[in-house]
Image (spheres, rainbow, N blue to C red):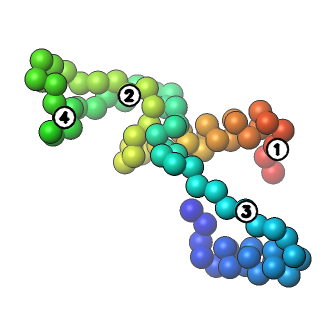
């Protein structure tokens, strides 16, 4: 998330140079990040499987609220962009 001052500065510069500015939002972005370490979760209240009340579940992808979620999303997006011709600077 960018600071408001940075966004204002960018938009002022873009307007001055007559740049076209695009914006995007990735729906459920954090849910698309792949986590590398093993993370286990309990069944959330109201969604318990009555046949498996004593079980925990291993996550394959990130969830909102998971501390690894922002980094997992960044790594996933970064890899996609680099593989499609963009470069890190």
Q: Earlier in the sequence, mark 2 or mark 1?
A: 2
Query: Contact, CB < 8 Å: mark 3 with mark 1?
Result: no
Q: Earlier in the sequence, mark 3 or mark 1?
A: 3
Question: Residue 12 placed where, x, y %?
Answer: 77, 81
Give me the C-alpha separation between circle 2 and circle 4.
16 Å
Query: 68 or 13: which is nearer to us?
Result: 13
- Per the rendering, the mark at residue 22 is 3
Is 4 placed left or right of 70 in the picture? right
Closer to the eye: label 2 or 4 = 4
Q: Residues within 10 Å of mark 2 (few under 14, many from 20)?
A: some
Q: Earlier in the sequence, mark 2 or mark 4?
A: 4
- Per the rendering, the mark at residue 47 is 4
Q: Earlier in the sequence, mark 3 or mark 4?
A: 3
Give me the C-alpha separation between circle 2 and circle 1.
30 Å
Which residue occupies 40% across, 40% down?
63
Question: Residue 3 placed where, x, y %?
Answer: 59, 72
Which residue carries the number 2 mark? 59
User: Looking at this rendering, what residue extends furthest in the right direction?
Assistant: 17
Question: Residue 74 placed where, x, y %?
Answer: 60, 44
Q: Secondary structure at mark 2?
A: loop
Q: Secondary structure at mark 1?
A: loop
From this viewpoint, is residue 57 visible?
Answer: yes
Give me the C-alpha separation between circle 3 and circle 1.
19 Å
Q: Residues within 10 Å of mark 4 (few under 14, many from 20)?
A: few
Which residue carries the number 1 mark? 87
Query: Contact, CB < 8 Å: mark 2 with mark 1?
Result: no
Which residue occupies 81% across, 51% down?
89
Q: Earlier in the sequence, mark 2 or mark 3?
A: 3
| For residue 85, above or below residue 20 | above
- Per the rendering, the mark at residue 9 is none
């Amino acid at each position: 998330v960018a600071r408001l001052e940075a966004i204002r500065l960018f938009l002022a510069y873009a307007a001055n140079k007559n740049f076209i500015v695009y914006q995007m939002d990735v729906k459920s972005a954090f849910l698309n990040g792949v986590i590398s370490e093993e993370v286990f979760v309990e069944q959330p209240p109201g969604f318990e499987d009555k046949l498996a009340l004593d079980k925990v579940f291993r996550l394959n992808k990130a969830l909102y609220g998971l501390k690894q979620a922002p980094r997992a999303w960044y790594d996933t997006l970064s890899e996609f962009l680099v593989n499609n011709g963009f470069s890190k600077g």
